[in-house]
Image (cartoon, rainbow, N blue to C red):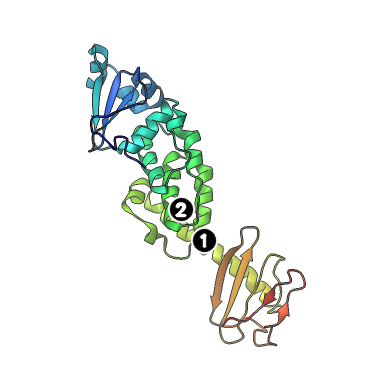
Amino acid sequence: METPNDTQTNTIVEIAPDGDLILIVGPEEAKLHVDSMMLRAASKLFSAMFGPNWKEGRDLLNGDRLTEIPLPEDNAAAMKIICSVIHHQRSEVPRTLAAGDVLAVAVAADKYDCVEALELASDRWLRPSGDEAGNLMLLTAAAYLFQNAQAFKELTKALILDYKDPYLTLSCKEVESAMPWKVFCLLEEQRGSARLRVADILMAGLSKNPATLISPSTVITIRNNNRFRVLVKIAPEAREMVCEAENPPPHADGPDCSNFECPITKRAIVPLK
């Protein structure tokens, strides 16, 4: 995400050329020319700030020149995107953003209570472009702040099905400040519950025959010794899960099934190396 004033510190980004307000954002003091009425309509916090009870609002009412308001703690690039969305400057709004940038925008939108104004734009940004777990967690935190239940559901589903390590390894300062710890605990609980359910289904099938196909989309891999594993691929997502147990299921010491081919899927069931 580029800084709005990459070249000159005094450059003004003209988001609303006829506006009455200059936002001076971040430590780099990026200057965004905006319209206070548009910001008030989109943000409850700006609506109060620019009202008659705040100094900024009185300056706007009494001033005969552009009013400058410093926002030194905010992310300049994120505020530029938010202001562009609010002012309907579609050409200035990126269709895709890196996961960290999406979270930065979400943090600023939550701070200024303008999440609703960014609903359509954020819906595009929250679609994951890859399976990198760190990015999925950043987008999950952003979806939490954007109050996008559907995106939050899809992102946490991907984390539960695709990520095997502790979720705390994906934690960072930005995520922790945006999302409560309870979410990490619930993710661990849901993943553990899903693994147990899959293991129960597989054990039920293996108790009848070690080469039994649980469903047309499931492939089982068995090792005939005192430990066994089951590899499951669940269509259509082709998710994989490995279940282990200390004791083999009934019939696990039976005939070698290394050359067994399922009559339904035509997929070979081979021993682990």
Asked whether, in this view, residue 231 is left or right of residue 12, the answer is: right
Identify the mark nearer the N-term, 1 or 2. 2
Asked whether, in this view, residue 253 is left or right of residue 14, the answer is: right
- The numbered disc on residue 162 is 1
- The numbered disc on residue 202 is none
- Towards the viewer: 74 or 54: 74
- 41 vs 228: above or below: above
**Badge 2 element:** helix
In which quadrant is the N terminus drawn? top left
Question: Residue 93 in the image: x percent, y percent?
Answer: 44, 34
In which quadrant is the C terminus drawn? bottom right
How crowded pointer 1 is (Cα within 10 Å; few <14, some 14-19, many 20+) is rated as: some
Kind of residue at badge 1: Asp
Asked which quadrant contains residue 168, the reply is bottom left
Kind of residue at badge 2: Leu
Residue at the (66%, 82%) spot, across then down: 250
- 123 vs 234: above or below: above
Q: Is residue 200 visible?
A: yes
Residue tagged 2: 136
Asked which quadrant contains residue 117, the reply is top left
- 229 vs 64: above or below: below
Question: Residue 26 in the image: x percent, y percent?
Answer: 25, 37
The reply to whether callout 1 and callout 2 are in contact (CB within 8 Å) is yes
Q: Is residue 53 visible?
A: no
Asked which quadrant contains residue 118, the reply is top left
Residue at the (74%, 74%) spot, across then down: 262
